[in-house]
Image: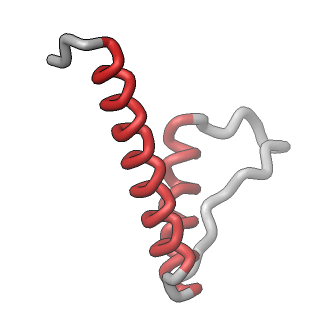
Amino acid sequence: MVANPEDFIQYNKRLVQDIFRKKEDFHRAQARLPIEEKVKILVELQKISLTIHPKRDETDRRMVWDIS
């Protein structure tokens, strides 16, 4: 643990910068994925969404794309 408040602030700044840098790297890598891989990821997210929030009734138009 950091005893000096100024050291603590500097530590937090470096930590936040590192988090944002890694987030940016992740998004760049995701952007370079082929479209087929992006669609597979989207379908997985659709499945997760329907698991978390099931359809309310027949008028609920949410679905999982069938890409098989």
- The image position of residue 66, as x and y in percent, is 59, 74
Of 29 and 57, nearer the camera is 29
Q: How many marks?
A: 0
- The image position of residue 12, as x and y in percent, is 37, 29
Relative to 24, is 10 on the left or the right?
left
Relative to 68, is 3 on the left or the right?
left
The residue under the point 52% across, 36% down is: 52
Of 6 and 54, nearer the camera is 6
- The image position of residue 14, as x and y in percent, is 36, 40
* Image colouring: secondary structure
The residue under the point 44% across, 66% down is: 25
Q: Quadrant of residue 8?
A: top left
The residue under the point 36% across, 30% down is: 10
- The image position of residue 50, as x and y in percent, is 57, 45
In the displayed orientation, state which residue is furthest to the left: 1
Relative to 15, is 44 on the left or the right?
right
Does 36 sit above or below residue 6? Answer: below
Does 61 sit above or below residue 12? Answer: below
Of 68 and 34, nearer the camera is 34
Q: Quadrant of residue 59?
A: top right
Does 61 sit above or below residue 37? Answer: above
Q: Quadrant of the N terminus?
A: top left
The residue under the point 56% across, 76% down is: 31
Does 52 sit above or below residue 62? Answer: above
